[in-house]
Image: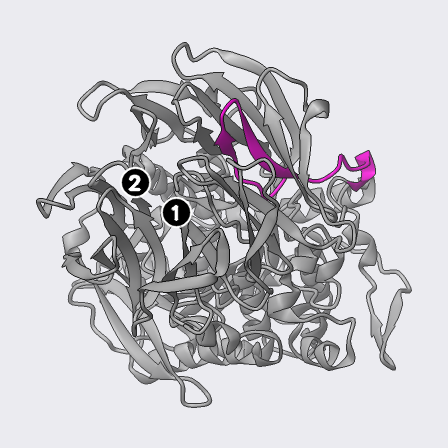
Amino acid sequence: MRYLRLLNLNPTPSMQSPTLLIKLTVCLALCSTTLFSQDLKYPQTRKVDQTDNYFGTEVKDPYRWLEDDRSEETADWVGRQNQVTEDYLSKIPFRKKMKDRLTQLWNFQKQTAPKKAGSNYFFYANDGLQNQFVLKMIRGLNEKPVVVLDPNQWPGGGTTHLNDYSVSRDGKYLAYSLSKAGSDWNEIHVINTETLEPLPDKIEWVKFSGISWRGDGFYYSRYKEPDTADVLKGKNQFHKVYFHKLFTPQQNDRLVIEDKEHPLRNFSAGVTSDEKYLVHYAGESSHSTEVYIKDLANPMAGTRVLCPGFEFQNTVTGNDGPWIFVKTNKGAPHYKLIAINAANPSETRSVIPESEEVLQSVGMAKDYFVALYMKDASSRLKVFSREGKFQYEITLPSYGDINELSVDDEENTIFYSYTSYTLPATIFQFDLKEKKQTTFFKPAIDFKDEDYVTTEVFYPSKDGTKIPMFITCKKGTKMDGNNPVLLFGYGGFNVNKTPEFKIERLVFMENGGIFAAPCLRGGGEYGEAWHQAGTKLNKQNVFDDFIAAAEYLIKEKYTNAQKIAIGGRSNGGLLVGACMTQRPDLFKAALPTVGVMDMLRYHKFTIGWAWKGDYGSSEDEVNFRNLYAYSPLHNIKEGQPYPATMVITGDHDDRVVPAHSFKFIATLQEKYKGPNPQLIRIDLDSGHASVTITGSSKPVDKQIAEFSDVFVFTMYQLGMTVR
């Protein structure tokens, strides 16, 4: 099944002979940090008399007005906060050096795995510093690529992002979705792949949607057009699926799926590669799905329930005639592949049974299934017959991640993209019959991967649970308890934190830093039980796991509490906020990015309601008590030794709205009385910066500017410099 996707709502080596100059630079950095931190004057943030009563508990919310991120008063506050942050960062002596080195590292060719569509192959590419990846097409694997779509040439100066694309079965038309300034709202447009000319078709108010072709049109998901004042604050209710026929206006699109009784259900739909079946998903949270199927070849056939209920995760991976292949965790916490008879969904058979390793995805080739597994958070790639019999395993380097697997059901050649913490995406081509592998694309980067080593350790959390953690540093690093460490985590929504390549972390590591990434509960590294152990009333386990990681690194002489910075984004921003308020003594610097900080009101904005499956909500007393106990905003206390903090957000984030970050930093600046800086960096005309196979949706120049500031701040606090 080529185009059917399930949508989830949703950086030391010891210095060998350091020079006197370096010693003096580090000393001056440490001294001056305290000096001008004491001189920081934060903007006055107006307070209002706002109190909410939750089951007899009164909770003050004096900065409620900051939730209106479109008001002139909020815009003025944002400008004044950014000026304080800019004044602070401008005094750090190696700021320009950092940006220059990061720009140098970033400037290398990048490419994704080619995907076959019709008789052509499509892939994303970036020459190095292009703000957005370009979509290219090749008529054959040895032909010269043709530029299909170049978002860098679109209006907006590279701030418009190409999110997704889908090609009609005959290969003639390509529909693509784009978003502006980091918004989750999308538009869909269409071009002719032969002439590359645009069609008049334009689809608006698309959100959390795939694009799936059938004949002369495609299926997509959208909400109703929101009121102007409600674009960001809308609760995203009554998601619907439509079918759009080419060369017709959107108002004529046929409504396919809606649910008037369940406003918070989300729907996505896709067609099997033979275009015989329509499969659609209904989701009530970020990780539970009910699946339906309709025989499109039979006009009289109704829609059947293929996978009932909202208890399990089910993903259709393809079909063989009426047999529909489904990856599911029903009765298999590590997932398995089953086949279901579309004509009689009660008739099922096992194809690839559950194993000790977690099954992440399954691709259908002409004669094989290609299964991507995860063992201790590192990728494994296995080949099975179409009957489900194990054939062989494709050998991969250790401690890596396959972040893209391209399989076509008419071919026995696959492509996959492999990365590690120090190795950018390399594309491999593999012949399944000949068992022959070749390197299709290997990037050339100004960084010596062979000088670094990644190890995986297992440490005990507070309750004794063994937690895996990857640790990457330069070879020969002396464990003397004095190395700077960046501890980065996520821990939620069944998301797997496998070894991923991030350019910005290289500067940290090549200047003496250790990067540590624990695989916290709440993720999916060990299946659904691991996920559930970090949700709702178990959420504290995630924070305990992260705190235990820092304690392990100190105990094992990697570092000390004055040398640890912690980071995370989105749900990981919540992680940082909770841990810095629970154990402020354990960290020197904190970097909560686009974080969920107000756990009592998160569900009231945009798609926040879909996170209740992981968090629970303040609407019932048991979950309120739990949320209130760890909500970062509500656990900032006066007199605590909070670490140096830089909150990062976008002023128009319409997923985790910036009010979370705004209210958190305002409270921190009000209550913290120590010398450590408490800053916020607010990117203007920017959103959540969703991460895809092409990296962040944020333009490259904005990424470089942001990461330069983040790592300048971090390294300065840890007594480092850029050599």
Q: Amino acid at mark 2?
A: Asp
Task: State the SS at label 2.
Answer: loop
Is 214 within the magenta?
Answer: yes
The disc, 2 or 1, on the residue closer to the chain's N-terminal end is 1
Image-quadrant location for residue 460: bottom left
Q: Which residue is mark 2?
A: 409
Q: Which residue is mark 1?
A: 318
Q: Report if residue 265 is visible in the image.
A: yes
Q: How many marks?
A: 2
Residue name at image x 49 percent, y 66 percent: 589
For the residues marked 2 and 1, what is the alpha-carbon distance in whole angstroms? 9 Å
Q: Are marks 2 and 1 in contact (CB under 8 Å)?
A: yes
341 and 57: which is toward the camera: 341
Residue name at image x 60 percent, y 48 percent: 303
Q: Amino acid at mark 1?
A: Gly
Task: State the SS at label 1.
Answer: strand
Direction from residue 48 to residue 507 in the image, left or right? left
Image: 106 above or below 327: above
Q: Magenta residues?
A: 207-230
Image: 621 above or below 563: below
Image: 441 above or below 330: above
Tag of residue 266: none
Describe the colour scheme in one phrase: one colour
